[in-house]
Amino acid sequence: MSINLLVMQQQGSTQSQKLNETQLMLLKLFSRQMPPEQLQKLRLLLVEFYDDLVQEEIERLSKEKDLSQERLDALQHEHPKRTPYS
């Protein structure tokens, strides 16, 4: 099954984009109308899911880059090395 979605671009033009497997599955799963309370629970569930993914990635990067809380605190107080704006 191929479903196309029209995506608005910043310039105001549109282009056709195929939905991915996850999007198609979610459309099929939630094809029925939901009460607002259920929709809110679903939104919270998805937010929690993505929060877990972000936390896992932060944990992985902090181990990979050896970023302790002390190191993060020190970085926070370092003067940023930026090119001055003219």
Image (spheres, helix red, strand yellow):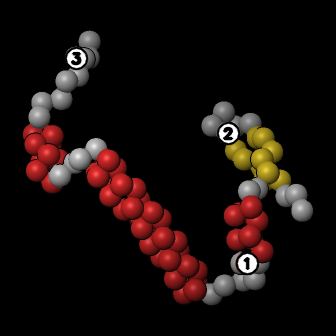
Residue 77 left/right relative to 46: left
Q: Looking at numbered disc 1 in the image, what kind of residue is underneath it? A: Leu
Q: Indicate the quadrant where residue 58 lies.
A: bottom left
Identify residue for label 1. 29
- Which residue is found at the position 15% from the left and 40% from the top? 75
Mark closer to the chain start, 2 or 3? 2
Q: Quadrant of residue 60?
A: bottom left
Looking at the image, is 22 positioned above or below residue 85? below
Residue density around tag 3, few if under 14, some if 14–19, many if 20 or more, within 10 Å: few
Q: Name the residue tied to disc 2.
A: 9
Residue appearing at x 69%, y 64% in the figure: 22
Question: Is residue 40 among the parts visible in the rendering?
Answer: no
Where does residue 20 sit, x and y in percent of width and height?
A: 74, 56
Which residue shows up at 74% across the image and 36% down it?
Answer: 13
Q: Residue furthest top?
A: 86
Left or right of 45 on screen, residue 80: left
Quadrant where the N terminus lies? bottom right
- Could you tell me the amino acid type at mark 3? Pro
State the quadrant of the C terminus: top left
CA gap between label 2 and label 3 equals 33 Å
**Could you give the CA–CA distance between mark 2 and mark 1, rounded to whole angstroms?**
28 Å
Q: How many marks?
A: 3
Name the front one of labels 2 and 3.
Answer: 3
Q: Is residue 19 above or below residue 65?
A: below
* Badge 3 vs badge 1, beta-carbon distance below 8 Å: no
Mark found first going from the N terminus, 3 or 1:
1
The local secondary structure at tag 3 comes to loop
The foreground one among 10 and 28 is: 28
The local secondary structure at tag 1 comes to: helix
Is residue 17 visible from the viewing direction of this image?
A: yes
Q: Which residue is mark 3?
A: 84
The disc, 2 or 1, on the residue closer to the chain's N-terminal end is 2
